[in-house]
Image (spheres, helix red, strand yellow):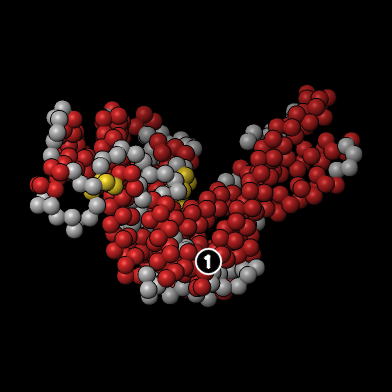
Amino acid sequence: MYAMWQLPESMKQSQADLYLETYQVLDLEMSRLREIQRWQASAASKLAADMQRFSRPERRINGPTITHLWSMLKLLDVLVQLDHLKNAKASIPNDFSWYKRTFTQVSFQWQDIDSIREEIDDLQIFLSTRWAILLNLHVEMFRVNNVEDILQVLIVFAIESLELDFALLFPERHILLRVLPVLVVLATSSEKDSESLYKRNDPIIPAFPDLHLSPAAILKELSIYFQKFAAQTRLLTLPAPHELPPRERQYLITNHIGTIRAEHDDFTIRFASSLNQLLLLKSIDGADVDWCKEVKGNMYDMVVEGFQLLSRWTARIWEQCAWKFSRPCKDAIPPESNGTSESFFDYEKVVRYNYNSEERKALVELVSYIKSVGSLMHRCDTLVADALWETIHAEVQDFVQNTLATMLKTTFRKKKDLSRILSDMRTLSADWMANTNKPESYLQSHGGDESKGNFFYPRPVAPTATQV
């Protein structure tokens, strides 16, 4: 938004026009805040409805699946980030105060301004109330009872995903770390000691490039607004000064650049080797089926590993930035100032003068590794696409046509509800056109044994959204 200034005496003549133009500029920004206010209300209602949908044990036969859990966690994460952004940005209430002041100056000549004034009052309450979005979500959730069960399911899922590294990419891990303290506050009765997980590993979590979250601080602050949780805040503590150096070593890239350098060199060599094997396979006609499957499977594993490395390295940069923003340098004295004391902006204290030469060198080196691996994978996109689709197709079809068939035999009589779900999965996901009789050469090489499952002709097709 635009900063306002006091009008000098020479401009008093056009004061009314300036107020009107300023109001028009600020009204455009306030309309966006009103859209956010309306969206968060509808999103909170949608999230609360999803939670209530799976709140009873008898309704869980059809869910919540992992997709349902992730959709709820991602929506909650967006609400948490919006609420934290609203709380952290001091420019928002400052601009609103100027907006309200200019509205008072220009609205005296308008007709029927009561509705506009009511909208402004509602927006003022929304902007001035800390954690207004989460408080509204809490109200929406507990309109119907029994949502504690699904909250505990989400907490257990988040903790298990963090402890067992279920999250494939680091943005997903950051989502879990951001929503976990909020879930603990909303549930208020979970037996999981989730806060100890933060104290041990993640005191600072990146939210935006220039904004970070502190889970322990969020838990303490939210306890004021949620009375049932207030009694548990005595168990929460912020990191002590002597605990900061070990955690700083975790966040600074300089302490990990040696491992990252070795990972980069090892990955580029193995990726090039797998790519050469794939090119050799394409140049040979009538290659062995098992060798084809092995080469394409290795290429698939290398691509997945590449995405994981890119995600992990990018997360290193985000997490170091979050740590630096939470720990600005106290005395910023740049070399070019020759030791003279000057006043510096806060942004310079956390970015420009908060990195020493070794940290800047490590940061540039890590960025170069990210660009190197990213461009390496991007250049061979068209070469490996068919191999990736064939591998995914084979794994999906092997599961739905062979593994699910065995599971259906064991669940048909005792667990009919589960059997119906498995049957529906098989019907939706199975590609029966790819399932044909084994070729004669394949049967001869395997002794005619057909007990090892169906044979699938390679089909470079991606699974549909329904199949996923």
Residue at 79 percent of width and 39 percent of height: 103
Quadrant hosting residue 199: bottom left
Circle 1 crowding by C-alpha within 10 Å: few under 14, some 14–19, many from 20: many
Residue at 31 percent of width and 55 percent of height: 401
Which type of secondary structure does the marked residue at label 1 adopt?
A: loop
Quadrant hosting residue 359: top left
Residue at 11 percent of width and 50 percent of height: 446
Estimate the x, y position of residue 207 in percent, counting from the top left. 46, 48
Q: Is residue 143 left or right of residue 416?
A: right
Q: Quadrant of the N terminus?
A: top right
Estimate the x, y position of residue 355 in percent, counting from the top left. 34, 40
Q: Nearer the viewer, residue 444 or 89?
A: 444
Give the labeled residue for mark 1. Answer: 54
Above or below, 328 against 335 in this view is below
Estimate the x, y position of residue 389 in percent, counting from the top left. 31, 40
Examine the rendering and report whether any part of residue 45 can be seen: yes
Q: Nearer the viewer, residue 115 or 282?
A: 282
Examine the rendering and report whether any part of residue 188 can be seen: no
Q: Is residue 429 left or right of residue 346?
A: left
Tally the numbered discs: 1
Q: Nearer the viewer, residue 4 or 387?
A: 387
Above or below, 37 against 238 in this view is above
Q: Is residue 277 left or right of residue 140?
A: left
Specify the amino acid type for callout 1. Phe
